[in-house]
């Protein structure tokens, strides 16, 4: 059995990490059985979540994990794509995971309103006595990385504008189709769901919620994936 180690469920989501939720969405879309457990970041091969234990093979980084799963189980979601569609997938994935992510991370980790909710969400995987200190270190590390990357030097208004431009590009690319590239999902749909669900699912009044709300087809995409793959059992 494949075991996924990720952030624990919170805010009505299986995971409050976009990358962890992306991986779970991919596994469900590709119909690969797995068990999810809260992960100890100290045991992760790359020092981040998610990571997996696949018959003793420990693999970190959601994209590396997906590549591993494609090699082992076949490319169940993307094999039908044309070269042009694969190029679009690659470009959108890079934008979402290496630009949209940083905007979302800064908005989340610099928010005073988010602090108690993040503390509660992280509590199952942090030591009880020093968990608050560790969470502070995580916050500083994320914001420092964003500062070094460059996007962390922008104001919140500028970050929201950048986020809006990313979501507009995604919205235009999705168009009126149920999923990217047709009636059935691809790995890009798993990626987008991981991010959209995290933007919309926060229990505080996060500004990114309103930005996503400007794009009805993205709201529909998120609802569609949730209903099909994450509906509560009857």
Image (spheres, grey):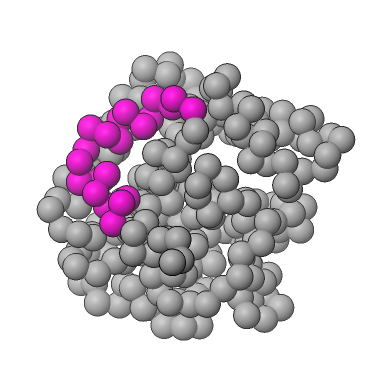
Indicate whether 234 appears above or below 134: below
Q: Position of residue 134 (x, y in %)?
A: 77, 35
Q: Is residue 143 above or below residue 69?
A: above
Locate residue 34: give its quadrant.
bottom right
Total labels drawn = 0
Residue at screen point 44% across, 25% down: 205
Magenta stretch: residue 108 in it?
A: no
219 part of magenta stretch: yes
Q: In this orientation, does residue 137 appear?
A: no
- Foreground: 208 or 181? 208
In the image, 228: left or right of 25?
Answer: left
Residue at the extreme right? 129
**Residues in magenta, as a range:** 204-224
Question: What's the magenta bit mostly, secondary-structure-wise?
Answer: helix
Q: Is residue 116 left or right of residue 206?
A: right
Viewer-nearest residue: 201 or 151: 201
* Image spot of residue 32 (x, y percent): 48, 77
Q: Which residue shows up at 49% across the image and 28% down it?
A: 204
Quarter that holds the C terminus: bottom left
Q: Residue furthest left?
A: 176
Task: Please identify the quarter of the rendering in which residue 151 is found.
Answer: top left
Q: Is residue 118 visible?
A: yes
Which residue sits at x=27%, y=34%? Answer: 213
Pick the residue in front: 198 or 43.
198
226 above or below 115? Answer: below
Residue 88 image position (x, y, % from top left): 25, 57
Indicate left or right for 4 with 223 as reference.
right
Q: Position of residue 191 (x, y in %)?
A: 39, 55
Q: Residue at x 23, y 32 (%)?
A: 214
């Amino acid at each position: 059995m494949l075991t996924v180690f990720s952030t624990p469920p919170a805010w009505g989501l299986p995971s409050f990490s976009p990358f962890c939720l992306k991986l779970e969405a991919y596994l469900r879309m590709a119909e690969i059985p797995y068990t999810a457990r809260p992960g100890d970041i100290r045991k992760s091969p790359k020092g981040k979540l998610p990571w997996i234990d696949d018959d003793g093979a420990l693999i970190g980084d959601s994209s590396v994990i997906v590549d591993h799963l494609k090699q082992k189980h076949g490319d169940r979601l993307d094999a039908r794509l044309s070269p042009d569609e694969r190029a679009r997938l690659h470009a959108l994935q890079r934008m979402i995971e290496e630009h949209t992510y940083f905007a979302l991370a800064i908005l989340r980790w610099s928010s005073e309103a988010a602090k108690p909710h993040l503390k509660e969400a992280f509590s199952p995987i942090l030591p009880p006595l020093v968990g608050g200190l560790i969470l502070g270190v995580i916050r500083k590390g994320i914001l420092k990385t964003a500062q070094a990357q460059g996007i962390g030097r922008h104001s919140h208004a500028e970050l929201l504008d950048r986020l809006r431009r990313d979501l507009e590009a995604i919205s235009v690319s999705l168009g009126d189709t149920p999923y990217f590239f047709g009636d059935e999902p691809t790995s890009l749909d798993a990626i987008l769901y991981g991010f959209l669900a995290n933007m919309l699912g926060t229990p505080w009044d996060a500004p990114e919620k309103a930005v996503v709300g400007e794009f009805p087809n993205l709201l529909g995409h998120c609802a569609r994936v949730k209903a099909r793959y994450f509906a509560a059992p009857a």
